[in-house]
């Protein structure tokens, strides 16, 4: 076998096969990175909306007949702070945690039982875990050598987990899970609410 | 707001274990399917083996079989598994026909139709991790394929904190903790007026007889110590598997759900002597719901049930796993000083695990997973 034959019959096909496999693996990895980052973004939108709903339900507490003014002020302060538009990430985390603490503190003293608030709190906690889980998946893929070298993560910003205190969460109760939200709400429209339709 | 996040859902549920044999995962799947149907959704269950129609716990149109599972000896015990192109094709056909809004896959990381369904899934996937079985070695060896499958899970559910720990540490994912559900009312109102014949106490064990980790040996060793004080103690065991038992031990073998309920409500003490690896403890919960005093080994998942952090008092007696002397003295405490109040509190605590609240939590996870699903799959399915 001449050296030319060796090159055409052995080396070139081998190089092509290796290149194809490498290309396929990189594409596959890029798909996974893309999917993980997209999920981190979408779960954030869902968490954001869930937190806004939670704060709105919390504000409805002040409409409970017989609530004392000090409790009403405490709740409206905390919920209002969480609904404040244009909060930085860190400020939002601490405002949401404060709201959790306030709700834990006032809960046992309320005259009525705000059932939909409890389920909103449980939902927000579920959404937060799903979001942080998605962020962790995205981050672990982004940290891979191949992903960093070939910049497979693109220009998407690095996702961050949302750290806050959930407070004490009751188990969800039976009730119709899809009951429409109460119309009592004073509804501020914070800009933190994502503009695109989440559902 | 599309139909998917608000209205009735078509939910495909995949159970890796056959309904021919009783088991915690199977019961959970059946209970959840029934809850979903009662809440106006349309669940469909795929599992190996056949469903006993006499059991009447699932509408027949809700159930599809993937064929018999193959018994295979590996990991130190005989597992019934499904794999290969034929099973994969059947799973894909079921997925196509069902046109589901969401897939709920149980025990996704097992060599079963669960993993095949996860691999083939195009819709949002919710996965429930039941067993606290670490699989780090397989994760390293199977590498990318398994990891990519795990990444397809949109929302994980773990049945206990210990199951969640395994998910976090070995799979690199996280999960919402939602306990197993039971139908509390089926076990509940044991007539408190009906006096227990204290002169003829009954002790119950439920669980596989031939599986050492269920701890029957520890119980059998403890019984003579109990019999010193209570010579007329009746010991009743029920469960799969065959083994040689002492003559004073009555073996009922495999029993129906109804027999189990009757048995529990006639007993004076229920013993769960499990040695290890019990990720939830549904039988313990059922015993609590039926109001029988319980004595259980000190496994994390049992302690979670019997000593919930927000309750000051224990709801049952615990003893060091494997210690037959400690078991005997715990049972003697219960027999000598029965506490109906504590049993009633345990019964009350079991209410938290009723399907009405457990199912609502699972549905909340479904809604969250669907809300976070890519727009494409929603448009395709909302029409």
Image: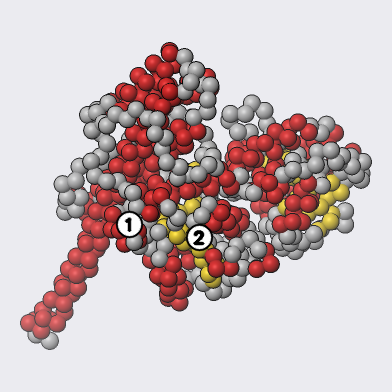
Residue A35 percent coordinates (x, y) = 28, 54
For mark 1, what is the residue?
A: B378
Between A187 and A151, the one nearer to me in the picture: A187
Quadrant housing residue B374: bottom left
The residue carrying pointer 1 sits among few (fewer than 14), some (14 to 19) or many (20 or more) residues within 10 Å by Cα, namely many
Which chain is mark 1 on? Answer: B
Residue A36 shown left or right of residue A7 in the figure? right
Q: Which mark is residue B54?
A: none
Which chain is mark 2 on? Answer: B
Say whether mark 2 and mark 1 are on the same chain: yes
Name which residue lies at 50% across and 17% down: A66
Residue B217 percent coordinates (x, y) = 75, 51
Of the residues under marks 1 and 2, which one precedes in the sequence? 2
Residue A121 shown left or right of residue B335 in the figure? left
Scheme of colours in the image: secondary structure
Label 2 sits on a secondary structure element that is: strand
For mark 2, what is the residue?
A: B43
Residue B92 percent coordinates (x, y) = 41, 71
Name, please, the residue furthest toward the left: A4
């Amino acid at each position: 076998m001449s050296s030319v034959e060796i090159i055409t019959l052995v080396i070139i096909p081998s190089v092509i096969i290796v290149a194809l496999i490498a290309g396929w693996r990189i594409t596959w990895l890029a798909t996974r990175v893309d999917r993980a980052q997209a999920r981190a973004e979408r779960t954030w939108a869902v968490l954001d909306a869930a937190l806004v709903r939670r704060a709105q339900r919390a504000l409805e507490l002040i409409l409970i007949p017989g609530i004392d003014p000090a409790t009403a002020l405490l709740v409206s302060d905390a919920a209002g702070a969480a609904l404040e538009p244009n909060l930085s990430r860190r400020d939002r985390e601490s405002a949401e945690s404060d709201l959790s603490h306030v709700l834990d503190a006032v809960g046992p003293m309320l005259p009525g039982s705000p059932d939909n608030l409890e389920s909103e709190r449980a939902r927000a906690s579920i959404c937060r875990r799903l979001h942080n889980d998605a962020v962790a998946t995205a981050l672990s893929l982004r940290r891979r050598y191949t992903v960093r070298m070939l910049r497979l993560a693109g220009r998407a910003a690095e996702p961050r987990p949302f750290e806050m205190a959930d407070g004490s969460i009751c188990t969800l109760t039976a009730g119709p899970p899809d009951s429409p939200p109460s119309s009592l709400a004073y509804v501020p429209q914070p800009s933190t609410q994502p503009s695109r339709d989440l559902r | 707001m599309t139909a998917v996040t608000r209205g009735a859902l078509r939910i495909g549920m995949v159970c890796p274990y056959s309904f021919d044999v009783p088991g915690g995962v199977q019961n959970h799947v059946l209970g959840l399917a029934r809850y979903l149907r009662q809440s106006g959704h349309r669940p469909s269950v795929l599992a190996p083996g056949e469903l006993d129609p006499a059991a009447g716990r699932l509408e027949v149109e809700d159930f599809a079989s993937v064929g018999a599972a193959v018994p295979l000896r590996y990991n130190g015990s005989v597992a019934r598994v499904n794999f290969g192109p034929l099973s994969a094709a059947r799973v894909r056909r079921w997925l196509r026909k069902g046109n589901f809004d969401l897939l709920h896959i149980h025990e996704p990381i097992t060599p079963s139709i669960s993993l095949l369904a996860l691999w083939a899934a195009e819709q949002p996937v919710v996965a429930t991790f039941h067993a606290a079985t670490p699989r780090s070695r397989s994760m390293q060896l199977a590498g990318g394929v398994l990891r990519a499958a795990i990444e397809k899970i949109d929302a994980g559910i773990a049945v206990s904190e210990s199951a969640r720990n395994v998910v976090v540490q070995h799979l690199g994912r996280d999960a919402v903790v939602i306990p197993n559900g039971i139908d509390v009312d089926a076990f509940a109102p044991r007539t408190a007026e009906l006096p227990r014949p204290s002169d003829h106490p009954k002790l119950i064990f439920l669980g596989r007889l031939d599986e050492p980790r269920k701890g029957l040996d520890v119980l059998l060793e403890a019984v003579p110590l109990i019999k010193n004080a209570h010579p007329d103690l009746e010991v009743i065991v029920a469960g799969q598997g065959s083994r040689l038992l002492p003559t004073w031990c009555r073996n009922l073998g495999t029993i129906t759900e109804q027999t189990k309920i009757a048995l529990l409500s006639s007993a004076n003490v229920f013993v769960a002597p499990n040695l290890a690896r019990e990720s939830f403890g549904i039988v313990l919960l059922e015993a609590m719901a039926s109001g029988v005093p319980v004595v259980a080994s000190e496994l994390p998942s049992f302690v979670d049930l019997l000593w919930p952090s927000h309750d000051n008092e224990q709801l049952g007696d615990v003893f060091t796993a494997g210690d037959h002397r400690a078991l005997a003295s715990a049972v003697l405490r219960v027999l000598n000083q029965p506490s109906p109040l504590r049993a009633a509190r345990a019964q009350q605590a079991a209410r938290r695990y009723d399907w009405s609240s457990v199912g609502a939590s699972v549905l909340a996870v479904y809604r969250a997973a669907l809300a976070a699903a890519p727009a494409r799959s929603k448009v395709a399915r909302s029409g």
